[in-house]
Image (tube, rainbow, N blue to C red):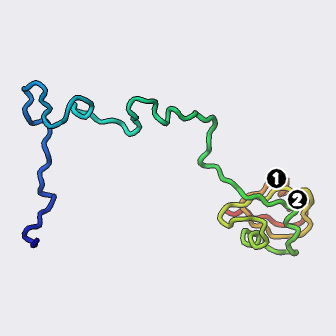
Amino acid sequence: MSLLELRSKANKKRKRIGRGNSAGQGSTSGRGNKGTHQRTGGKISPGFEGGQTPFLRRMPKLKGFKNPGKIAYQVVKTDSLNSFKQDETVNIDSLYEKKLISKKTVPVKLLCGKEKLTVKLNIELHKVSNSALEQVKESGSEFKALQ
C-alpha cells in the first residue's frame, strides 16, 4: 500500500436513514422492522431495563441525610497532654509524633478529659470544647485556634 492509496474517514459519507422506498407495504427505509429504534425519536434512557423494574427503584430508600459540609475532627483529651514538658508547644506535628493522633491532614479538637491538665503549654489546634478551654486557662496554658 502506498501513501496515495490511503483514505481519510473524514470524507466518508454517513448512511442517510429513512430516504428509501416508503410507499410499499412492509418497507423499512433502512431502519429495520417495527419497534423503538425504527421510529423517529426512538431513544431509550440509560436506566431503562426493557420494562422490568429498574435497579434504582428496586433499591431500598434509606432514611436520613449525610451533610456534605460536616467536618470530622480527631479528638485529643486534655489529660493526654500531661505527657508534654512545661512550656512546650502542642500542635498537630507534636501530637502526631507522640501518636496521639493518626493523621496530620485531619483537623484536631481538644476535649475535656477525666484528669485535669497540670502542665503549662502553648496549644495550637483547630477547635476546643468549652470545658477543655476552662481547664487550659486554669493550668495557665494558652490556646490558639488554627484556621
Point 83% across, 57% down: residue: 133
Point 73% across, 60% down: residue: 108
Residue 97 relative to residue 15: left or right = right
Q: On residue 135, which mark appears?
A: 2
Q: Residues within 10 Å of mark 2 (few under 14, many from 20)?
A: many
User: Distance from label 2 to label 1 (Cα)?
Assistant: 9 Å
Point 66% across, 53% down: residue: 71
Q: Where 20 falls versus 113 (above or below)?
A: above
Q: Where 69 falls versus 32 (above or below)?
A: below
SS at badge 2: helix
Give 12 or 109, whichever is nearer the viewer. Answer: 12
Residue 84 relative to residue 52: left or right = right
**Which badge, 2 or 1, is on the more N-terminal residue?**
1
> Contact (CB < 8 A) between labels 2 and 1?
no
Tell me the quarter of the picture where residue 30 sits.
top left
Give 48 or 98, whichever is nearer the viewer. Answer: 48
Q: On residue 130, which mark appears?
A: 1
SS at badge 1: helix
Which quadrant does the N terminus fall into?
A: bottom left
Q: Residues within 10 Å of mark 1 (few under 14, many from 20)?
A: few
Which quadrant does the C terminus fall into?
A: bottom right
Point 73% across, 58% down: residue: 74
Q: Where 17 falls versus 111 (above or below)?
A: above
Tell me the quarter of the picture where residue 94 sits.
bottom right
Residue type at the position of mark 1: Asn
Q: Residue 129: x percent and y percent? A: 79, 54
Q: Residue 115: x percent and y percent? A: 92, 59
Q: Residue 72: x percent and y percent? A: 68, 54
Residue type at the position of mark 2: Gln
Q: On residue 69, which mark appears?
A: none
Residue 144 relative to residue 71: left or right = right
Q: Residue 100: x percent and y percent? A: 78, 66
